[in-house]
Image: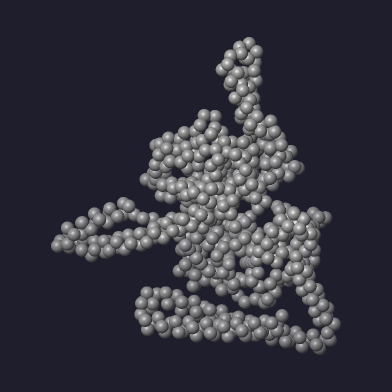
Amino acid sequence: MAFVQFSQVSLAFGDRDILKDVSVNLQTGTKAALTGANGAGKSTLIKIMAGLIEPDSGKRIAQKDARIAYLPQSGLVHHGCTLREEADKAFLWGYEVQAQIDKIGDELKTNSTPALLERHYELMTKLEESGWHRRATMAESVLLGLGFSKEDFDKQTDLFSGGWQMRIALAKALMGSPDILLLDEPTNYLDLEAREWLEKFLSDFAGGFLLVSHDRYFLDHTINEVYELFGGDLKRYPGNFTHYEKVREVELQTLIASYEQQQQEIEHLQSFIDRFGVKATKAAQAQERQKQLDKILANKIEIPESLKKIHFKFPAAPHAGNIVLTLESLSKSYDGVTNVIDKLDLVLENGERMVVAGRNGAGKSTLLRVLAEVDKNYTGSFKLGSGVKVGYFSQDSAESIKGSETILERLENHAPLELIPRLRDMLGAFLFRGDDVFKSIDVLSGGEKSRIALLELLLRPVNLLILDEPTNHLDMHSKDVLLQALKDFGGTVIFVSHDRGFIEGLATKVLELTPGKHREFKGDYFYYMQRLEDEANGTVGASSFDTSTQQSKKIVEEKKVETVSAGKASYEEQKRIAAEKAKLERAVKKIEDAIAKAEEEKAHLETELSRPKVYSNGEKAKAVQQKIAAIEEQISSLEADWEEAASKLE
């Protein structure tokens, strides 16, 4: 049985302990995840286990001849050969073993000793059991599973982008049949289909593996134990990732209670020292308190950032009509011949959260750019509904994040007044913690800028969010915060994601794109996957459309009839309709302004209520609460007026 193990391994960077007497054993059959807050040292631990970093103390022991494959988060580039040739490098160990077999074979011709015969047999058995002789088939299976096409096999590796370069590296790690796999964020560059393939591969993998991932669904379906790294200590939790989180939540409640008690004690001691430390009559007592305080601070309790519960809400979504957008026969092509999107009919209603699904190249990001009006080179019609205000996020959004101001300064300039007190929490949820918020914008990495761009978008008052891969560069905790905020969002969401757990938690509708085709499913992602499974099993016709697609076509046809009828109206009638429309538009705008003003006043009062001098004074608190209740009634009445006016306008 192959293994790699630590025994009381320690490592420090300066005065910070990354690992403190850590012991762990990975062996054949291990299926483990490594978790911990950003900066806890997960990548460092994996590098030590891979033999790339020497610890300060302790032992790393690996079984002789055990093959260990390591995949870093990023930075690997391949060049100078074809994809097929690069893949074959994963099997170099096999060529070396074959060379040993051939050498011993030559020696056996003249010196047939029992030791040589036994070694010859061992090497031949090892090579046969590894599947090395089937390496071409294995390489093809892994490459196709990770999303490469057969046409890619003879393409020069220099031509692949950074994300595909990391897929090549992952493919090489997998196809070499290692005894132990060490994978640092292997799902970062994979789409949904490739993640599902990797999930199946690891489930069937005969060796052992330790991986870091921020995809909860992926972890729940691949691992059966979790190691948490926190404060330099490593603790093992048996079970899948969801089970670990439940157990850790109970532990955290106890930890928080101890933390709060310790904070009170620290505050009490510090208060005494500050008050009496300079008085001669109390100097001895103050010094004693200082000793007590120093002892507590030496064993100060810390709360893991990854387990702190942070919540935030979007600014109130501006009011919009029931129909958010309508597409009729929308088509988009890049070469003028092949339509990536072909005659798409779609009606999206207020409050829906639609995921756009499909393989790479199906047109998902292209459709989102069209809906965000970034790409206007299409045919067919596209119309936004009444009062719709769009917010769009893509991976290119990071390019707009420039300047020398600090992160906190930039967000304060973009945030509504009522959200400014919550900015530090929100930045923390998006992995900017402590002094990180004072970093200058111009020194941020691409991933950090992407998180800032996403957070800026979420601070704007919009009612239609179009999000292309919003969870990239977020850890699991940040995804949870974003997911809950989107579920609470009062508007409509269209999104693309490769995180299945995120999709299942958010989507209420699925639009499936395949090259030149589309289908619409009125239901969550689980329903969609069940439909695909039924089709694969032959229990549902693969060409049948969901009833929501038929409904979309019906609504589009009704709008066609309305348009034709309006065109036939008399000139005087058209003038009357135009005047009535203008009147209603003014009325809707006036009500919207009144609602915005009332909501602003309500937010101001809620901020006032959160001040200690108000909530600690019963009479003042009651007066503010009465004002808030009155404004809420006013807003409710205005919303009813708005619904009536907007309905007439539509």
Residue 176 place in picture, x, y as percent: 62, 35
Describe residue 262's horizontal placement relative to residue 18 as left or right: left
Colour scheme: one colour
Q: Residue at x 14, y 62 (%)?
A: 281
Q: Nearer the viewer, residue 291 or 28?
A: 28
Describe residue 47's horizontal placement relative to residue 620 as left or right: right
Q: Nearer the viewer, residue 456 or 185?
A: 185
387 lies above or below 337: below
Is residue 439 visible in the rendered structure shown here?
no
210 lies above or below 291: above
Instruction: Determine which quarter of the picture holds residue 528.
Output: bottom right
Q: Nearer the viewer, residue 97 or 394?
A: 97
Residue 351 place in picture, x, y as percent: 64, 71
Residue 143 place in picture, x, y as percent: 69, 42
Extreme residue in the left direction: 281
Describe residue 426's horizontal placement relative to residue 199 as left or right: left
Q: Residue at x 77, y 88 (%)?
A: 576
Is residue 649 visible in the rendered structure shown here?
yes
Q: Residue at x 54, y 32 (%)?
A: 66
Count of picture labels: 0
Residue 284 place in picture, x, y as percent: 17, 58
Q: Nearer the viewer, residue 418 or 528?
A: 528
Q: Residue at x 71, y 53 (%)?
A: 359
Instruction: Determine which quarter of the picture holds residue 202.
Output: top right
641 lies above or below 108: below
307 lies above or below 11: below
Describe residue 343's horizontal placement relative to residue 86 as left or right: right
> On the rendered image, what quadrant is the C terminus found in?
bottom right
